Image (cartoon, rainbow, N blue to C red):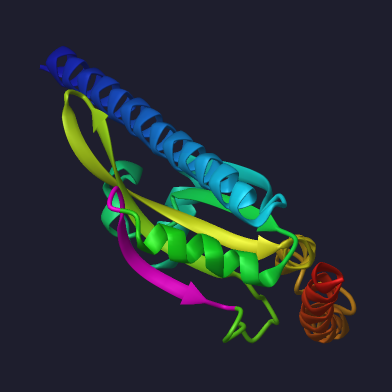
Amino acid sequence: MERQKKSRNEKQKKSVKKGEKENQLKWESAMKLVMTRLEILNAELSMEHNRRIMQHILGRVKSEKSIREKLKKKGFFVQPEEAEGILNDIIGVRAVCLFEDDLYKIMDSLLFSQEIRIVKIKDYIQTPKASGYRSLHIILKIPIVFSQKEQWVTVEIQLRTSAMDYWAELDYQFRYKKTGKNAAAIGEDLKKYSLLIEELDQNMLTLREKIAAI
C-alpha cells in the first residue's frame, strides 16, 4: 500500500514538472513572438519617420518562485500553471524610445493590429504612480499555436523613454531597501527626479521639433 502511494506521488510530481516545463515553453514562445512583432513595427515606424523609434526591446518570463510570491501576496494559493487567469505580467516585454510621443505611436499601431486583443491600457505617463513612476503599459493577448491548438496568451508591454527607464531601474532597486537608512529621503529624491525627467523629456521633444524645422 505504501509502495503504491509512493508511486502515485512520483507520477504526480512528474506530471506537475512536465506541466511547468510546457508552460515555460509556451510563455517564452509568446514573449519571442511579441518581441518579433515589435521589431517589425520598429522597422516600419523608423522608415516612416526617418529615425530609429525603439532603441531596444527586452523581454522576460517570471520565474516560478516570482510567480508564487506574487500569487501569495495577492492572496492566491494556486500552482504557477494556474496563474495565467490571475496575473497579467507573467510575460513582460519592454520597448525603450528616445522620445515620449514615440510611445504613443507604438500604442496606436498596436491598437489597430488585427492579430492581437488589447485587454487594458495603463497610462502612468499621464497619471504617474505616487512614487513618481512613469510608463505606458499595454496588456494584450496574442495567439500562439502550442500543443497542436491555438491559445491566447497574456503579455504585458511596457513602453518608456530612456530617461523613464533608468529612473525605473533605480526605483526597482530602491523598493527592496525601503526599510534601510535614509529610505524616506531617497523616496522623496526619486519623486523629485521623476518631475525633472518629465521636464527633460518634454524639452528634448521640443528640441527635436526645432531641429526638424531647420
| Residue 67 higher or lower than 31, as above or below | below
Quadrant (top left, top right, bottom left, bottom right) of the N terminus = top left
Q: Nearer the viewer, residue 72 or 164?
A: 164
Q: Nearer the viewer, residue 213 or 77?
A: 213
Instruction: Give the left or right position of residue 202, taking residue 49 as reference.
Output: right
Q: Position of residue 140 (x, y in %)?
A: 36, 57
Q: Position of residue 86 (x, y in %)?
A: 31, 60
Q: Position of residue 198 (x, y in %)?
A: 76, 81
* Residue 131 visible within the image: yes
Q: In percent of the image, x 83 and y 80: which residue is there?
A: 203
Q: In percent of the image, x 45 and y 56: which residue is there?
A: 156
Q: Which residues are magenta?
A: 114-124
| Residue 200 higher or lower than 117, as above or below | below
Quadrant (top left, top right, bottom left, bottom right) of the C terminus = bottom right
Does the magenta segment cover residue 192? no
Instruction: Give the left or right position of residue 87, taking residue 70 as reference.
Output: left
Characterize the magenta stretch by its predominant secondary structure.
Answer: strand
